[in-house]
Image: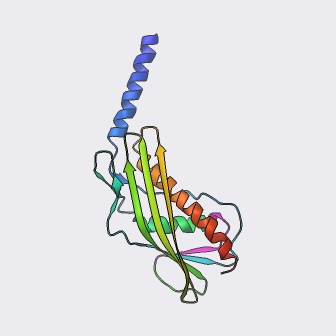
Amino acid sequence: MIRKYLAGALLLAALLSLTACGAGRVVPLDYYAAQISPPRCSSPVVVQKFTDARGTDSLGTNKDGQTFLADPSQPVADWVSYALYQELKANGCQALYQTVDQGSPNLIVRGEVLEVNLKQKDTTGYSCSLKVRLHFIKNGKEISAEQFGSQIDKVYLPSSDNPRKALRECLQVLLTEVMENMLPKLKTM
């Protein structure tokens, strides 16, 4: 009986390690809003689709030195800008999302993705860093520009989904900082 359980446990461990080894290099990007508590925005905010200033499709490298690539259906700049829009909505702001510059009398937030660097250190260890620059435009004039960054080091159970988890958590850390900085300012902009 004990041998049967031991054999089953060994088989499960082998399957988990094979799953981790067979992880693809294309990483689907997703995001769940971190939901920072109030304050709320006093007027609508328009988030325009960001640009990717990195000049590469790479998200970083796995433990074998192979490049992680974003899923082509979800460009990095879209992922980050739409996540900011989700955060604003989750925090009670009247947020609008624009994929093209349509102008607006409301505050406009534009951004540039400056860095995305995901590193798989070993089978379960990951580090990630992100940097963005945000531009705040009101009545056609830039009123401020700020740069934000985040960095995480995490260990996960073996899974092919770990690159996605690490990128999501890194973006959540970044947007937590952005929202803590931005929400109080939005009351006066």
Tell me the residue at 61%/77% (across/down). 45
Asked if 122 appears above or below 86 in the picture, the reply is above
Instruction: Specify whether residue 107 is painted magenta.
Output: no
Q: Residue furthest top?
A: 1
Asked if 15 appears above or below 24 in the picture, the reply is above
Q: Give coordinates of residue 33: x percent, y percent.
A: 58, 59
Closer to us: 72 or 164: 164
Stretch in magenta:
90-99
Quadrant of the image occupied by residue 143: bottom right
The number of numbered discs placed on residues in the rendered structure image is 0
Closer to us: 43 or 112: 112
Closer to us: 124 or 101: 124
Please identify the quadrant where the C terminus is shown: bottom right
Tell me the residue at 44%/54% (across/down). 128
189 horizontally vs 111: left or right: right
113 horizontally vs 36: left or right: left
Q: Give coordinates of residue 101: x percent, y percent.
A: 47, 83
